[in-house]
Amino acid sequence: MTDPQETILGFDPGKDKCGVAVMDGDRALLYHQVLPTAQVIAQISNLCPQYNVTRIVMGDQTTSKQWQQQLIAAFPALPISLVDERYSSLEARDRYWQMYPPNFLTSLIPQGMRQPPRPIDDLVAIILIERYLAKSSQDNP
């Protein structure tokens, strides 16, 4: 079982932009944003004390090794957990339409063919947190 006091920062690493999300132990979404890479460390520095972040969860694919080193250097006290991010972008695209239902004209396009009108890296970060929480609850029933 995950700690209800745990507040997790999800991080979808990228080269040009990154997704960041914060979720508490009750799975309440507190924050989500797509950020240019140049702003990521500064924004995480603001979010950690604001939401009392206790762990960083990040994707294990694109640029994750470089970002993991930067995050360890910037936040040495925070544990970092890597999560399998395969297919998370497809899942995030579906999640976008759940969170922001399409207007009438857009709804006529089959969901699999719709492209969200903005980057969805923040939604990937949410999915990474959910995957971490699901795995943690399986590991500790």
Image (spheres, rainbow, N blue to C red):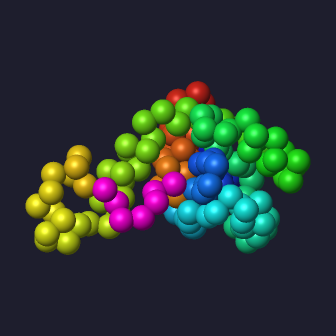
| Magenta-span inclusion, residue 133 | no
How many numbered marks are there?
A: 0
| Magenta-span inclusion, residue 118 | yes
* 106 with respect to 62 (left or right): left
Q: Position of residue 14 (x, y in %)?
A: 62, 48
**Chain part drawn in magenta:** 115-121
Q: Residue furthest left?
A: 108
Quadrant holding the C terminus: top right
Q: Residue furthest front?
A: 16
Q: Position of residue 30 (x, y in %)?
A: 57, 67
* Residue drawn at (11%, 61%) of the image: 108
Q: Position of residue 136 (x, y in %)?
A: 59, 35
* 117 with respect to 107 (left or right): right
Image position of 136 with respect to 71: above or below: above
Q: Position of residue 5 (x, y in %)?
A: 68, 55
Quadrant holding the N terminus: top right
Image position of 7 with respect to 139: above or below: below
Q: Nearer the viewer, residue 83 or 63?
A: 63
* Residue drawn at (67%, 39%) of the image: 63
Could one spot residue 65 in this view of the protein?
yes
Image-quadrant location for residue 84 = top right
Q: Nearer the viewer, residue 82 or 37?
A: 37
Could one spot residue 98 in this view of the protein?
no
* Residue drawn at (20%, 72%) of the image: 103
* Residue drawn at (61%, 38%) of the image: 62
Prevailing SS of the magenta stretch? loop
